[in-house]
Amino acid sequence: MKTILVTGGAGFIGSNFVRHLYSKYPNYRLLVLDALTYAGSVQNLPEGAFESDRYDFWYGDVRNGELVDTLVAQSDVVVHMAAESHVTRSIYDNRLFFETDVLGTQTVANAVAKYKNKVERFIHVSTSEVYGTALGDKINEEHPLYPLSPYAAAKCGADRLVYSYCATYDIPAVIIRPFNNFGPHQHLEKAIPRFITSCLLGESMTVHGDGGAARDWLFVADHCDALDRAIHAELSTIKGHVINIGTGTHKTILEVAQAVQLAMQPVAKRESLVGAVASGKAHDANRFASELDEAAKIQFIGDRPGQVFRHTCDAQKAKELLGWEPKVGFEEGLQRTIEWYENHREWWQAQMWMRHIPILTASGRKEMH
Ligand SMILES: NC(=O)c1ccc[n+]([C@@H]2O[C@H](COP(=O)([O-])OP(=O)(O)OC[C@H]3O[C@@H](n4cnc5c(N)ncnc54)[C@H](O)[C@@H]3O)[C@@H](O)[C@H]2O)c1
């Protein structure tokens, strides 16, 4: 029997994780704290949970010290993921990012320090964005921190804040740095849901720059498995550590858009295209695209300022300390994600107007990203 507090549990990763815990551990009591910003929704929470006595939802702000103290004081484990999470949005309005991501983390970390006799462990969900562009092939936890966007800088501040609390107050913290997640319940502002819904709506997919920015794409269920292991691993082996979570491979944004295009073609056409690609007949992006339906074309737009050009995870430490390895390959994860968006139009239709975000470029031009 454990009580687990999840902050940001009504968002994309948080709600996948809360559903994972709720169905896997019937003996655990779950506390969810979420301010239900544009990114969070009670629709994401486990079915039937509101009627359950092992689940409490708290609509509130992670910067509210009194509320956070009350919830942390009852918890054996705190998993902190409440944050403003969208890089592009941080370009035009970044104040909230520093307030929520840094001061919210400070509030939670203060409460953990205050109740450290009760709190067995504190899992802080950071991000691979703190590293900036990879200096070598793969990024391990020793890679220098070069955040390139206000979002990344805010998360970097939070990440180092938690580290400093381990050193100063000896809190039982673990810092997890996940790479790019995708899967069901992700907001339409993020690339993969935007691509999928563009295909469903018969619109072109917009890709930043030449589409060459590469990321390590982690299916959200694998991330939840890693967090589950971080809750249950022997504390002495992970306390004070930073642990990367990613697949060790990368795909460019253009490759991801093409994978979505292909996966969403009718089966017969898809098979003939796969054959064409395999035989080298459709090797370049434009020719490949010309074989696809008009509806699923790729449109290139200006590059995102502060773009990270490549991120590939070295997850050796996660394997050693958590016994974790990803189980869901990119194609399978994408298929599961596409099916979810195909079957949940009512969930995402309300977010349509937020798919494209205005930014001001360094030259003062307004662009929709
Ligand atoms: N999505 C990714 O690819 C990714 C990758 C690495 C790390 N992360 C990190 O994982 C965490 C979760 O990311 P996500 O993609 O699920 O984000 P998300 O934007 O989908 O969800 C964030 C949640 O936090 C809540 N929230 C925001 N401000 C709050 C506040 N002041 N008080 C309480 N709740 C608040 C929102 O309502 C929402 O439910 C974040 O910390 C993010 O930085 C995300």
Image (tube, rainbow, N blue to C red):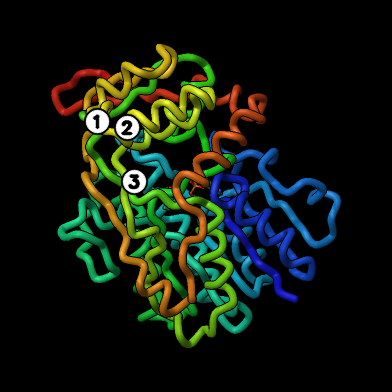
Judge the density around disc 1: few (<14), some (14-19), many (≥20) Cα neighbours within 10 Å: few
Q: Quadrant of residue 43?
A: top right
- Let me know if residue 282 appears in the view: yes
Mark number, residue 277 = 2
What is the secondary structure assignment of the residue under circle 2?
helix
User: Which quadrant, please, contains the C terminus?
Assistant: top left
Q: Position of residue 327 (x, y in %)?
A: 51, 60
Judge the density around disc 3: few (<14), some (14-19), many (≥20) Cα neighbours within 10 Å: many
**As rendered, which of 240 and 231 lies closer to the eye?**
231
Left of 280 or right of it: where is 201? Answer: right
Q: Nearer the viewer, mark 3 or mark 1?
A: 1
Label located before the other in sequence (3 or 1): 3
Determine whether 317 is above or below 131 in the image: below
Q: Position of residue 84 (x, y in %)?
A: 45, 44
> CB atoms at circles 2 and 1 under 8 Å apart?
yes
What is the secondary structure assignment of the residue under circle 1?
loop
Left of 6 or right of it: where is 269? Answer: left
Q: Position of residue 2 (x, y in %)?
A: 71, 74
Point 52% across, 35% down: residue: 187
Name the amino acid type tagged 2: Val
- Let me know if residue 195 appears in the view: no
Residue linked to disc 3: 151
Left of 79 or right of it: where is 91? Answer: left
Point 68% across, 61% down: residue: 21
- Ligand 1 within 8 Å of the CB at mark 3: yes
> CB atoms at circles 3 and 1 under 8 Å apart?
no
Task: Measure the C-alpha gap from mark 2 to mark 3.
Answer: 37 Å
Determine whether 72 is above or below 199 in the image: below
- Ligand 1 within 8 Å of the CB at mark 1: no
Residue linked to disc 1: 283
Point 22% across, 34% down: residue: 305
Name the amino acid type tagged 3: Tyr
